[in-house]
Image (cartoon, grey):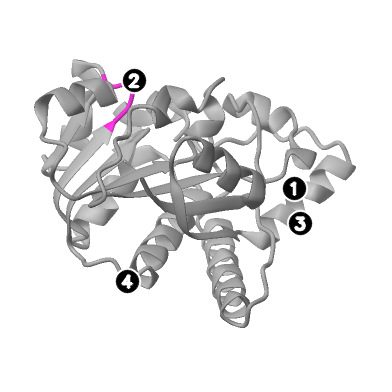
Amino acid sequence: MDISEFSRLNNKANYDRHPWETSRVNVLKHLLKSFKLKLPVQRIVDIGGGDAFLINNLYSENFANQYFAIDIAYTPEVIAQLKTNYNNSPITYFNSIEDYLAEYDDGVPTLFLCMDVLEHLPDEGLILSHLSSNPANYYFFAVPAFQSIFSSHDVLLGHYRRYTVAGFKNMLMQHGFSINKKGYYFTSLLFLRWVEKLLKKDKKESIDNWEAGKQKTALINTMLTLDFKTTTLLGKLGITVPGLSCYCLCKK
């Protein structure tokens, strides 16, 4: 997730979650259950864990036996604040994948999450090359979709690129991954972003400065829930609908 999250760690009680954040967590939980993984998995490792909102949500619903979060922004001070914010939940924090692998056995079946991270890297191999070919592991990746809507908002968030499912799949396969499931989500947001691009609207809102209020936030959350349920139903009918984000569930 975006490093801008860390600007609010010490002000946890006084900011609202962006509806994209909460809806994204709900999408992930639904997808993990639909993949028919054996839950709880032994380990979940969240690469690019940000302010640990996602990994703590999974912990609260018992998705795994062990939980880890990795982020280059995790200093001892940040980790201490995260532990305070989440009431010392049993999340183990690391500053790098190398540090995690040096301390924990790679032979334990693990679900690696890497959501909205790869687009921040000049070369995806900076992360993908560190993920082993353990056949017991699963890897879930999600990235922003469609380079045609790349805008100043992407620049604000530190994005290098956006993807299509086909291009994303090919890139992952070049790094040795096989694709089990793939798709898009947040179709309505894609439409809104296309309109913003067409109108050349300079979008300045990020997840760390959301101040729309509870009613608007609840309305957008409801819209995104209906959005995802609709595209899921269409997917079961064999109809692929594009969205603002795309994902791949992989083995290696």
Secondary structure under the numbered disc 4 in the rendered image: loop
Closer to the chain start, of discs 1 and 2, is: 2
Say what amino acid the circle numbered 1 marks.
Arg
Location of residue 185 (image quadrant) = bottom right
**Nearer the viewer's eye, disc 4 or disc 2?**
4
Q: Provide the residue span drawn in magenta.
A: 70-74
Asked whether the beta carbons under mark 3 and mark 1 sit within 8 Å of each other, the answer is: yes
Relative to residue 206, is residue 235 depicted above or below?
below
Q: Quadrant of the C terminus?
A: top left
**Nearer the viewer's eye, disc 1 or disc 4?**
4
Residue at image point 21% right, 66% down: 39
Q: At which x and y percent is residue 91?
A: 16, 40
Closer to the chain start, of discs 3 and 2, is: 2
Residue holding disc 1: 193
Residue holding disc 4: 36
Residue holding disc 2: 73
Closer to the chain start, of discs 1 and 4, is: 4
Relative to residue 60, is residue 39 depicted above or below?
below
Instruction: Mark yes or no: residue 17 visible.
Output: no
Q: Residues within 10 Å of mark 1 (few under 14, many from 20)?
A: some
Secondary structure under the numbered disc 2 in the rendered image: loop
Towards the viewer: 13 or 5: 5
